[in-house]
Amino acid sequence: MTFLYKFLTAATVFLVLLAGITPLGATEKPHVVIVVGTLHYSPELTMPAFAKELDRLGFSTTIVMGEGDPEKKVKDVLPGIGALAKADVAIFFMRFLKLPDAQWQPIEDYLKSGKPVIGLRTANHSFKYTKEHPRFAWNDGFGRRALGTPYIVHQGGTTEIQTVPKYKSHPIMSHVAKTEWTSPGTLYLTRLEGGCIPLATGTGTGKPRLVEKQFGAIQVNEHEADIVAWAWQNEWGGRVFGTTLGHPGDFAEEAFTRMLVNSIYWAVDKPLPDAEEKIATWEIQRADKKKK
């Protein structure tokens, strides 16, 4: 079976023919379902490119993605989200969604199955329900419970990345040659749950300010350092790779794309690519922000 997804950027319509769902018992290829639920940071461009690389490496991929801006919709937000029922690992790149019940339930079912979860950039603030909504607690809870941190705030400018020497032997860091690089994206601050293993950190600058969240007040300083990539096991037993990286420019850096590829191998207990296996990178321009 083959799925055809249509999605819109600022002025261009893209048609992407994506690999279909194959019954899990009929193939040895792990099935990766990539859920794109935002246009922020242009995952509608980066995720199809990344899916193609996973296909090359021996995975089966399905991208769940609707038309237009999902953050502005309350119906038919994530058509095809039922694909999660046959996923071996899920990648979430979503932001501020208000899913209807029928499209929320496959996500909750997937989380509670204890299968692996990978969250990119804005995934820790995937939902924005009103206070009166029965899923209001998931606004912070998805990031905190599924990925290891709620959303706090982000800084400005670029982020200087360093890997964590103590955890360089973690499988996700396998054959990541660089120990320092610059991400073009801003630093996102975290509030990691216990048990998270820090794999990379970042430093960035921004305005000093007081941020008041549902879970408490946080004073943000002009210069901040925080963890930008981590491994964890969530409350349902699912392996987690969380990262606040995911700006389109991050996909031009092999250290990042290798970490992301490694995380999927690690999540499904598949032998990791060796050092000689080249991992693709891409020069992708951000489509949701006009150049000044």
Image (cartoon, helix red, strand yellow):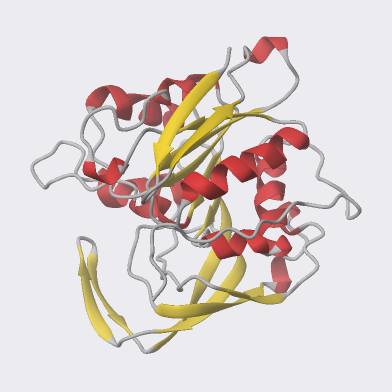
Residue 233 visible to an observer of this rendering: no
Q: Residue visible at 28% across and 22% down? A: 102
Quadrant location of the N terminus in the rendered image? top right
Q: Residue visible at 71% across and 31% down? A: 59
The residue sitting at the front extreme is: 11
Query: In terms of depth relative to the viewer, which is nearer, 71 or 285?
Result: 285
Quadrant location of the C terminus in the rendered image? bottom left
Q: Is residue 54 above or below residue 104?
A: below
Query: In terms of depth relative to the viewer, which is nearer, 183 or 150?
Result: 183
Relative placement, left or right, of 117 versus 22 is left
Residue 107 horizontal/vertical position (percent): 39, 31
Query: In terms of depth relative to the viewer, which is nearer, 196 or 27?
Result: 27
Relative placement, left or right, of 151 versus 62 is left
Residue 290 horizontal/vertical position (percent): 38, 66
- Total residue callouts: 0
Please identify the quarter of the rendering in which residue 288 is found.
bottom left
Residue 125 horizontal/vertical position (percent): 33, 53
The residue sitting at the left extreme is: 132
Relative placement, left or right, of 283 versus 153 is right
Residue 185 horizontal/vertical position (percent): 49, 70
Q: Is residue 167 above or below residue 61?
A: below
Residue 66 visible to an observer of this rendering: yes
Q: Is residue 153 above or below residue 242?
A: below
Q: Residue visible at 82% across and 39% down? A: 271
